[in-house]
Amino acid sequence: MFLSTYDPYYEKVSAYECGFEPFQDARNKVDIRFYIVAILFIIFDIEVVFLMPWLVNFFYVGTQSFWIMVLFLGILALGFAYEIVKGALDW
């Protein structure tokens, strides 16, 4: 500050440098349903990560691997049914 000039301009001192003023306060409460949907998306996305390598090698794995995957998908289906019964996906 002693060696340079202090010359603030509007864009530099604005709250956001995106070109417009914010619509409302950033500290508003967010509905918990957004977090629940995000967590559910992550869970079912991870399910695809486990399912994809198994599907690629489906003809090379044995029957034991098939039944383990059926068990995994059954547990996942039970979890999904529980979410529906509890109303986690209702808006």
Image: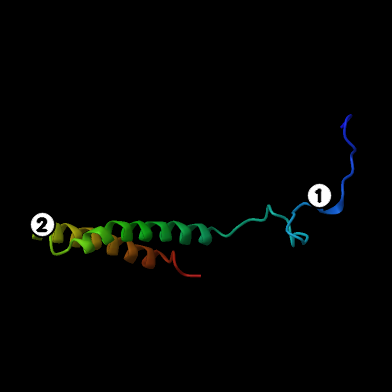
Q: Residue at x 68, y 52 (%)?
A: 27
Quadrant into which the N terminus falls: top right
Disc 2 secondary structure class:
helix
| Number of numbered labels in the structure image | 2
Residue named by callout 2 = 64
32 and 49: which is toward the camera = 49
Give how far across and how far down residue 43 sits, in percent: 37, 57
**Percent position (x, y) of residue 16?**
74, 54
Q: Which residue lies at the image location 42% right of the left edge and 61% below the top edge?
A: 41
Q: Which mark is residue 12?
A: 1
Which picture quadrant has residue 30? bottom right
Q: Quadrant of residue 3?
A: top right
Element carrying mark 1: helix
Q: Out of 56 and 62, give the one closest to the viewer.
A: 56
Point out the residue furthest to the left here: 63
The residue nearer to you, when weighing 57 against 82, is 57
Q: Where residue 58 sits in the image (x, y, percent)?
A: 17, 63
Numbered tag placed on residue 76 in the rendering: none
Q: Label 2 amino acid?
A: Gln
Q: Is residue 37 left or right of residue 9?
A: left
Residue type marked 1: Lys
